[in-house]
Image (spheres, rainbow, N blue to C red):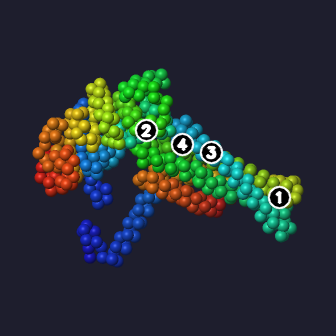
Amino acid sequence: MTGPGSAAPYPLPLRGEEALGRLTLDVVQSLGRFGTFLARTLALIVVPPFKLGRLADRIHFIGTRSLTLVVLTGAFTGMVLGLQVFLTLGRFGAEGFLGPAVALSLIRELGPVLCAVFVTGLAGSALTAEIGIMRISEQIDALTVMALSPLRYLAVPAIVAGIVTFPLLTAIFDVVGIFGGYLVSVKLLGLSHGTYFGEMQSFVEMSDIMVGAWKSLAFGILVPWVCTYKGFHCGHGAAGVARATTQAVVLSSVLILVGDYVLGSLLP
Amino acid sequence: MIRVQKLHKAFGDQPVLRGVDLDVATAEIMVIIGRSGGGKTVLLKHLIGLLRPDAGSILLDGADITRLKGAALDEIRRRYGVVFQGGALFDSMSVADNIAFPLREKTRLSSAEIRSRVEEKLAQVGLAGMGDKNPAEISGGMRKRVAIARALVTEPEVVFFDEPTTGLDPVLVNTIHHLIRELHRTFRFTAVVVSHEIPEIFGIADRVAMLHEGLVVESGTAEAIQSSSNPVVRHFIRGDVESVGHPGRASAGART
């Protein structure tokens, strides 16, 4: 058997074990870096100096730029929901519950999840690409050698902006979606206005709204965390930035769905 | 005074620095030359604290900066200015804002004082009146000069130049070298310049160190390096590719 310090390769069975061991170590180290990145960033949120100008810029970057997309996708999500739920409930003669069905679906699940996924595609990918380009063009190194923390300048404003904008964008998505459902079910399919909103008021409770709010808040931290981390740790050159951007969008989307399930299970 | 002692660094199985020894005296211009991939930029990144060595030390006025981190390392970095290879200008800011950035973030100077310092630096690098331009709107030579202005605006004790003339035409190469020499005469900072520009770089160097395969194979005045008998140095200066990559010949004439 060949020892680990030797230059000779391991025999075949041990090579597999070595590869598995290395893979495990890589995964554990990556998760450690990922967690440390968030912990250091969150710690800097409460330590002055606060970069309010950068925060305003990031709120614009994530929030304002995503507004049109959120309104558009929210409207069509609500319209699709209105149409499909109307047809489904119609089979049971229960069209009267359309309003609460649309509202609860949007407020508890679809609003936070779809809004987070769309904002990831639009602003999260841009965030990763921007920070990745700063990494490969040595702008992040320049901040470091100026004795300025790149985390404070790039990650903190993005995560705080996510905390501020995601719940607001989700609320807009929900409201627009509910009116999209209203448009289809009341204006096109003939459900009464009073039934749509009256039943909604009866069935939607504050706890449902809070479930959506907590989810959007969690995604508001998750998406900028993943996207800034991937930007900071992108590989070399344009290919490295492209790979990091793809990974950021895919990982964010997967974690949004996983987080949605976990929070949906834990929250009342 | 910077003293590099037995600096080792490997990336995976690939050794890049194999025991670098180097002294840089206060207020001198030390030029580090050597082939691409020879470890010059890696050495520079150690000097500015962006990389940590596997072994060895870097002493700045007696303090080992390889053992420092956090606020202590930041204190050392406040004494530094760095001109990166590509300039590393913040592309979301104008030229003037790039130069003003370190002053805004690290000093309590008033806006008027910062504006005045920025205009003064722009004039010193020959870019008066260009402050409103975006880095993307100016030429490569101008970007290098903006990067030099940004590195000098805090009046650092030590300035590092990472290949400050890469990608420039011969006239601009000489212009940038002349600028570095003039600014050095004015501000008397210690300069460490990593460069490929042979023989132009000898015109500004107080001393030159040749880095080859992770070792300083020779250091001395520009004249001494140009008349060196070390075959690695001679072949590199002449641009003779056949022998430069030969480690056996390198070690035969090595001295630090």
Q: Amino acid at mark 2?
A: Leu
Above or below, comparing residue B191 to residue A206 in the picture: above
Q: Quadrant of residue A190?
A: bottom right
Give the chain of mark 2: B
Give coordinates of residue A143: x percent, y percent: 42, 40
Give coordinates of residue A251: x percent, y percent: 53, 59
Give the chain of mark 1: A
Q: Amino acid at mark 4?
A: Pro
Which residue is drawn at the image coordinates 23% and 34% (left, top)?
Answer: B203
Task: Please tell me whether mark 1 or mark 2 is closer to you in this view.
Answer: 2
Marks 2 and 4, how far apart in space? 20 Å
- The answer to whether the residues at label 2 and label 4 have Cβ atoms under 8 Å apart is no
Marks 1 and 3, how far apart in space? 30 Å
**Residue tagged 4:** A157
Which is more N-terminal, label 3 or label 1? 3
Which residue is drawn at the image coordinates 49% and 55% (left, top)?
Answer: A242
Q: Is residue B254 visible?
A: no
**Residue tagged 3:** A65
Q: Amino acid at mark 3?
A: Arg
Label 3 neighbourhood size at 10 Å, few (<14), some (14-19), many (20+)? some
The secondary structure type at the circle numbered 3 is helix
Which is more N-terminal, label 1 or label 4? 4
Which is more N-terminal, label 4 or label 3? 3
A78 or A238: which is nearer to us? A238
Q: Are marks 2 and 3 on the same chain?
A: no
Query: For residue B89, which numbered disc appears in the image?
Result: 2
In the image: residue A121, left or right of residue A17:
right
Query: For residue A185, which numbered disc appears in the image?
Result: 1
